[in-house]
Structures are given as structure tokens and as C-alpha cells.
Image: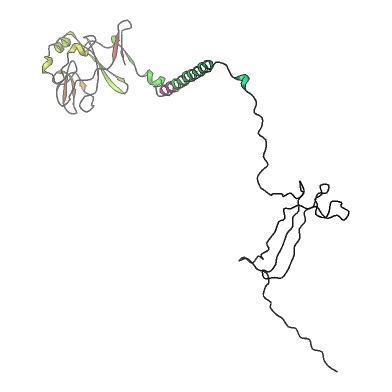
């Protein structure tokens, strides 16, 4: 008995389809823009005539054939014609829309241009006045917030009863954190202060210029050298003496000796004869 032998042979064939660099086969597409109606055997218009009563459908056809270029794909596209043998063009632009009708505003326009100009000037001027008022109120509010409070203003003035200060005595009060000397001078002290030659003083100043009433002398008790507090009724001139650096002041508070450059400062004060008070500040 003979034995049948089966032989299998495998052959690698070269590809017949041209490809892109990415490996995708090349398949050119041909679009036919000539719309032809399908052939009807019962048509009286001939096989090539276009029909308007039947809208042609979209159709595609792919043909495969072996050739030098490999796979060839043809796509035939039909579109409903408008006239026999017409061409349809494909485009991506939007359809042209008609511009909306613009309403007529002629009824709202004035016949005189000067009226519009006057109204414009009035509105601009009004806005300027309102803006200036707002700016003024803003600045006023900001500055008022920086003003001293009521408790600080209460300490801004100090009242002293003149009847409580005997003649020839000193009183020291505190005003705005500083000592204030108030002296009820005797007639002899007043005469002594007026007898001094003003030209010989380091800081020339008459006694009359330093007092509002000759018997009342009001001064800041701060040495003009380094801010020390002088001692009353002492020194070489019977006034005030600063023991820190040896400044001597006379009975009018004028510097007579020592390193102090100027006289003792005179603060703002008033003498109220009706109430009998000295108001400092």
C-alpha cells in the first residue's frame, strides 16, 4: 500500500500596495461633482439625462486592481442637480445672512445742536461740583480723625486760682507733661527786674515783654540747656538755679550765668480777672 505525503510550501510575497511612511496604504480619492440621475429603463429622457423628480442618493464605489501603483480606490459622489449637467461646488464658508434692519432713531434727534451742547456742559459742571464735594468731605474726615481726642483737649488747658498763690511765692503745675512756674511777685522784685540793663543780657528781653501783668510771672520750668528742672528762689540772682550744669536765672526768668543759651520759655496763657484765674494753654 502506498503512503500519501502532504507537502506545505510557504512563500513570502512582496506587498503590492504602496504605503506612507506611517504604514498607511495610499488610496487616492476621486470626487465626481457631476450629478447624474440613475438610469431608468422606462425613462423617456434618455440614459444620460438628468431627472428632477427623483433626488439621487449618495453612492460610493471602491475598486481594487493590481497594478504598478498598488491599491487604487475611487469614490464616485452624486449630488442633486439644479439644472441638467450642472456642477456642485463644496465650500466651508457660512451661509450669508441678511443684515438686521436698523431702527430709525430720527424721531429722537433734536433739531438744534446748541441744546445738546448746553446739556453736556451742565452735566459736566454738575459732576465737577459733586466730585469736589466728595473730595472735600473725604479730606475733612481724614484730618478730623487725626485731631486730638476730647480727653487730650481737656488737658490742653489748666486753670489756677490766683487767690491761692500768696505774694512772693511760687506754684508749680503740670501742663502737657511739663512743669510750669507761676510766681506772684512783690513790688521789689518787679523793680529789680526792670532795673537790669537789657543790653548786657545773653538773651536780651525786657521784663514787660515777658509778663502780661507785672505781678504775675508764668514760665515753663524747663532749663533751656539740657531740659532739667531749675530750683526756685535760689541762684546768684534770686530767681532760679539749675543744679545740673549751673545755669542761673533772675527774677524774670532770664539767663544770667551758666551754659543755658536762652531765657526760660513763656507759654500761652491768659489772666481772667472776672473769675480770678490764670488759664495756661
Looking at the picture, how far across and down is residue 219, in whole percent?
A: 24, 17
**What secondary structure prevails in the magenta region?**
helix
Q: Is residue 130 left or right of residue 75?
A: left
Q: Indicate the quadrant containing the N terminus: top left, top right, bottom left or bottom right.
A: bottom right
Picture residue at 15% right of the left edge, 11% below the top: 194
Magenta highlight range: 139-143
Residue situated furthest top in the rendering? 274
Q: Is residue 80 above or below residue 144?
A: below
Which residue occupies the foreground of this view, 31 or 18?
Answer: 31
Within the image, what quadrant is residue 229 found in? top left
Residue 142 is inside the magenta segment:
yes
Within the image, what quadrant is residue 132 found in? top left
Looking at the picture, how far across and down is residue 11, in whole percent?
A: 70, 80
Which residue occupies the foreground of this view, 21 or 2?
Answer: 21
Which residue occupies the foreground of this view, 28 or 122?
Answer: 28
Q: Is residue 268 above or below residue 95?
A: above
Looking at the picture, how far across and down is residue 130, in whole percent?
A: 48, 19
User: Total label count?
Assistant: 0
Picture residue at 61% right of the left edge, 19% below the top: 108
Which residue occupies the foreground of this view, 246 or 79?
Answer: 79
Looking at the picture, how far across and down is residue 259, in whole percent?
A: 16, 27
Q: Is residue 267 above or below residue 27?
A: above
Q: Is residue 192 above or below residue 27?
A: above
Q: Indicate the quadrant containing the C terminus: top left, top right, bottom left or bottom right.
A: top left
Q: Is residue 114 left or right of residue 156?
A: right
Q: Is residue 164 left or right of residue 198?
A: right
Residue situated furthest right in the rendering? 42
Amino acid at each position: 500500500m502506498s503512503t500519501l505525503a502532504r507537502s506545505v510550501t510557504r512563500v513570502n510575497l512582496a506587498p503590492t500596495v504602496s504605503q506612507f511612511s506611517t504604514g498607511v496604504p495610499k488610496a487616492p480619492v476621486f470626487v465626481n461633482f457631476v450629478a447624474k440621475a440613475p438610469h431608468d429603463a422606462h425613462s423617456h429622457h434618455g440614459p444620460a439625462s438628468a431627472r428632477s423628480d427623483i433626488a439621487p442618493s449618495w453612492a460610493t464605489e471602491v475598486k481594487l486592481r493590481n497594478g504598478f501603483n498598488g491599491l487604487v480606490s475611487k469614490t464616485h459622489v452624486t449630488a442633486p442637480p439644479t439644472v441638467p449637467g450642472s456642477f456642485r461646488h463644496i465650500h466651508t464658508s457660512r451661509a450669508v445672512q441678511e443684515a438686521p434692519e436698523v431702527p430709525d432713531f430720527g424721531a429722537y434727534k433734536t433739531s438744534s445742536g446748541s441744546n445738546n451742547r448746553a446739556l453736556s456742559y451742565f452735566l459736566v459742571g454738575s459732576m465737577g461740583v459733586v466730585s469736589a464735594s466728595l473730595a472735600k468731605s473725604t479730606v475733612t474726615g481724614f484730618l478730623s480723625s487725626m485731631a486730638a481726642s476730647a480727653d487730650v483737649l481737656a488737658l490742653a488747658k489748666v486753670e489756677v486760682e490766683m487767690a491761692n498763690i500768696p505774694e512772693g511765692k511760687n506754684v508749680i503745675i503740670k501742663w502737657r507733661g511739663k512743669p510750669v512756674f507761676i510766681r506772684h511777685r512783690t513790688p521789689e522784685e518787679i523793680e529789680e527786674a526792670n532795673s537790669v540793663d537789657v543790653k548786657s543780657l545773653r538773651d536780651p528781653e525786657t521784663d514787660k515783654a515777658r509778663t502780661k501783668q507785672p505781678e504775675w510771672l508764668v514760665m515753663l520750668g524747663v532749663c533751656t540747656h539740657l531740659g532739667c528742672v531749675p530750683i526756685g528762689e535760689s541762684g546768684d540772682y534770686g530767681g532760679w538755679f539749675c543744679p545740673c550744669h549751673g545755669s542761673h536765672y533772675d527774677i524774670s526768668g532770664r539767663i544770667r550765668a551758666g551754659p543755658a543759651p536762652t531765657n526760660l520759655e513763656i507759654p500761652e496763657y491768659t489772666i481772667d480777672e472776672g473769675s480770678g484765674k490764670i488759664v495756661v494753654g
